Amino acid sequence: MSVRAGLLVSLVGATVAGCSSPREAPTPPPRTIAHYSVADFYKNAESFGASFSADGTKILVSSNRSGIWNAYAIPTAGGEAEPLTSSTTNAIFAASYFPKDGRLLYSSDEGGNELSHLFVRNPDGTTKDLTPGKKLSARFAGWAQDDTSFFVASNERDQRYFDLYEHAADGYARTLLYRNTKGLELGPLSRDKRYLALVKPRTTNDSDIWLVDRKTGTTRNITAHTGDVSNSPAAFSPDGTTLLFVSDAGREFKSLRSHDLATGTQKAVLEPNWDVWGADYSKSGKYLTVWINEDAAYTSRLYDAATLKEIQIPGMPTGLVRGLQLSRDDAKVAFYASDGSVPDDLFAGSVAERPARLTNTLNPAITREDLVVPTRVRFTSYDGTEIPGLLYTPHQATSAAKAPAVVMVHGGPGGQAQFGYFALTQALVNHGYVVFDINNRGSTGYGKTFYAMDDRRHGEADLGDVVASKQMLVATGYVDPARIGIMGGSYGGYMTLAALTLQPDAFKVGVDLFGISNWVRTLENMPPWWASFKEALYAEMGDPKTDAERLRRISPLFNASKIKAPLMVLQGANDPRVLQVESDEIVAAAKSNGVPTEYIVFPDEGHGFVKKENEIRGYTAILAFLDKHLKGTTAAATR
């Protein structure tokens, strides 16, 4: 997972209509809004991923319906999901069906330590670890065009770098295709296996694409430039003559471009007014799927690859549409859809016909109308910069009954608050909290100038936006200005701690999920497999050897004596990114101030919680903490 990633890994998807400014206080509905427990919100059966079986009758997905992520097969004709794995301890994430039989590939780590191995599951239920060993991480990297082999990225040789291997589908004999000795990030491989695209990041908004020609043994930079330009490879054309890539050269947003492998000629393919995140061809080459980040929501667009005419699938559901996948024969399409208030449901069907819904993920005990669809808002920050975000307003909030509010800060640095279903957010809103999911400066998706505005100004420029958002919330007319808190995970957890230490009077309470408290230590103790973008992270955050003074200045731990607002901290003991000591020390410091402090450590979680029982326990505790210290009441009665 990239260091730029936020708290959760997002799937590609599409947008729903939203507002450009905070709406007026809603008119109370004639019915009573039921209050649900956090556990109710986790009785949904969430799923992601979609790999068609060899005969096209099943779709392989990852689902947490058992309480732990496992692999399931869902019939394309409709019917009950079939469990294919049954882990009760470590999360299992499905990768792909084998193209010619019922075997499948999946990945799993140990308690969230991010040392994932790749496994094969046979039709009889037996499994085999294809990447055995210790202190290694491996991931599935796609199938060969002839379906006789597949590719795996692994750092077993050198923890710092990922090499690329080819495994035979029969017998699993493997061959090293690319030995990575320069710390480059792996990109796509051409279908004839001649070309491999790599990425060399210099900073988080400046990178180049290097092209390896395995036939001639040469490696060359195909995006040499001056200034800050972000370049990343997307996909080789089926005939192996061009490479599609994403670049923001000469513009604010990333466009889709092509590079002719023979002549070096480059040209624009698609230039929307939002960031293109990637693209890929279907197996036959007939279709091209392009993923675009449109104002905090991913869109999946399907094109005729030859004409670039957009394909309109009839009867598509309204709202968010994400994770679009085609079957290997291009006959079927699968995707997920939601309006942002409920978990994604899986849909599938022919490209030319109305797709059918295959899942119904919302807990039947929850009334859909009780949930809230977010709206887009923008406000003017302290220096005139326009700051976007997503606003969730409880149905019961009015100017006569002002609500408490929570500013939610996403992960990163450089992540993004996006449309989608988030159980904790919906639980908070259901219990009467306004939630503003802010995209402060430095967030992805709003152009490279906005993205770079917080570089080496973290805890200062970006924190100013978070504090300024309080004025927007109060201006809605239905937020109590004396009851506004802050919450975030990972980098958002750092921002929570920064707010409580650097701006101690700004927020009534803070909830930190595995946030950084000591930047010097965190930057000095990055996992080895972050080596390829270590330089880029240093360029954005600072080098602990040369910027220690500034890093100490913005680190909450060295300002912890200023904490006076109640603080709650959640931490995974196996977190390789934000070590438990980061939370241990800030909690001890807050307690020494006499501040009401609650601390929960999950011994079987890493960077982000994946087990339902842990999420229920932790998020129920968050709700109770906010009810006590922000709302000023005991926990509300639940249905």
Image (cartoon, rainbow, N blue to C red):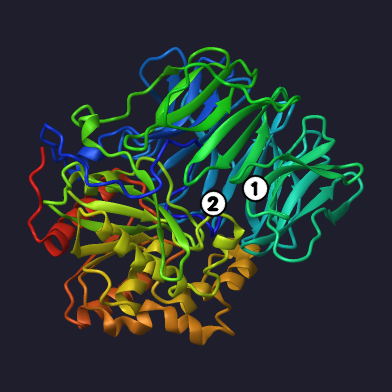
The reply, left or right, for residue 581 in relation to residue 531 is left
Q: Nearer the viewer, residue 346 or 465?
A: 465
Q: Position of residue 415 (x, y in %)?
A: 49, 56
Which is more N-terminal, label 2 or label 1? 1
Q: Are marks 1 and 2 in contact (CB under 8 Å)?
A: no
The reply, left or right, for residue 584 in relation to residue 416 is left
Relative to 601, say whether 234 is above or below: above
Q: Find numbered disc 1 in the image and state the secondary structure of the residue it sits on.
A: strand
Crowd rating for badge 1 (residues with CA inside 10 Å; few <14, some 14–19, many 20+): many
- Amino acid of disc 1: Ala
Q: Nearer the viewer, residue 188 or 303?
A: 303
Residue at point 57%, 13% (across, down): 352
Whether residue 571 is visible here, answered yes or no, is: no
> Which quadrant of the figure has residue 375?
top left
Judging by the rendered image, the residue that carries numbered circle 1 is 153
Judging by the rendered image, the residue that carries numbered circle 2 is 445
Crowd rating for badge 2 (residues with CA inside 10 Å; few <14, some 14–19, many 20+): many
Q: Position of residue 572 (x, y in %)?
A: 35, 60
Relative to 477, say whether 481 is above or below: below
The reply, left or right, for residue 365 in relation to residue 538 is left
Q: Position of residue 518 (x, y in %)?
A: 42, 77
* 1 vs 2, front mark: 2
Whether residue 218 is visible here, answered yes or no, is: yes
Q: Position of residue 588 (x, y in %)?
A: 26, 78
> Which quadrant of the figure has residue 589?
bottom left
- Amino acid of disc 2: Gly
Residue at point 30%, 63% (across, down): 470
Q: Which mark is residue 518?
A: none
Quarter of the image where the C terminus is located: top left
